[in-house]
Amino acid sequence: MTADAKARVRRMNLVVALASVVFFIALSALQFLAGNIGVGWFIAGLGAASVVSSPFLSRRATERARLRFGDGTYEIRSGISTQRFTAAEASQVVSADSVALGLTPAAPLLMVVGATKRIAMLSGVVWNADQLGALASDLANRGVPLLSYSERLTAAQLRAIDRRWMRVWEAHPIAVGLLAGLAAMLLISAVVLVALTILR
């Protein structure tokens, strides 16, 4: 990963962390207003932890990132996982010149798709255009059909073309995020209230 890519990832993670702080502040404020002081402080602590851990997690992700291919096998290592697959497992490779995912800026996107699901997704926020192009060409040279899109697309549009390309939460991050946040708030509130009741 280049120095520019590392800087982009760290900036992106910082933006996500700051956005989550606003979310946690709103949730904790609601709990304070409802009189659930313990729950409010717990949620506020989660928000603080997300900001404090963001630089460490970003550094770990950028240091571990690796992309290896050339012999018909492929390895994509990110900060949290390692994906391995072969050209025989890929039924399609999709290259888009400009796609915005969640809070990230629009960037090139490459997806390797299997018979029933997406195998891997690489964003131009992390990988440069030369790396994505070389990977797409390598797969295409091994007989994997290549689809290219030059126009700017959204994650929702990609899912509408083929449901394998994007998961629901990637195509509709705001709606899914609100539902997940509400569910998390209810779960955290229930757990803390039960704990406070037991300790009284």
Image (tube, rainbow, N blue to C red):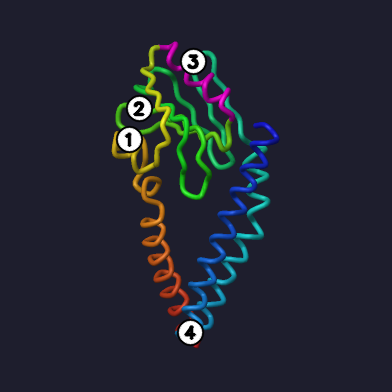
Q: CA distance from mark 3 to mark 4?
A: 58 Å
Q: Earlier in the sequence, mark 3 or mark 1?
A: 3
Q: In the rendered image, which quarter contains the N terminus?
A: top right
Q: CA distance from mark 2 to mark 4?
A: 49 Å
Closer to the chain start, of discs 3 and 2, is: 2
Would you name the residue on which mark 2 appears? 114
The residue under the point 53% across, 38% down is 81
Label 4 crowd (10 A; few <14 / some 14-19 / many >=20): few
Q: Which mark is residue 164?
A: 1
Identify the amino acid type marked 1.
Arg
- Compare residues 89 and 25 and report the one nearer the observer: 25
Q: Is residue 191 above or below residue 172?
A: below
Measure the C-alpha gap from mark 2 to mark 1: 8 Å
Q: Which residue is label 3 attached to? A: 138
Q: Secondary structure at mark 4?
A: helix
**Which one is nearer the viewer's eye here, 104 or 43?**
104
Q: Amino acid at mark 3?
A: Asp
Q: Secondary structure at mark 2?
A: loop
Distance from disc 3 to disc 2, alpha carbons, whole Å, reads 16 Å
Distance from Cα at disc 4 to Cα at disc 1: 43 Å
Which of labels 3 and 2 is toward the front? 3
Q: Position of residue 175 (x, y in %)?
A: 36, 57
| Disc on the earlier residue, 3 or 4 | 4
For discs 2 and 1, the disc positioned in front in the rendered view: 1
Residue in view at x 52 percent, y 46 percent: 104
Q: Which residues are magenta?
A: 128-142
Q: Name the residue at 36% across, 23% down.
A: 92
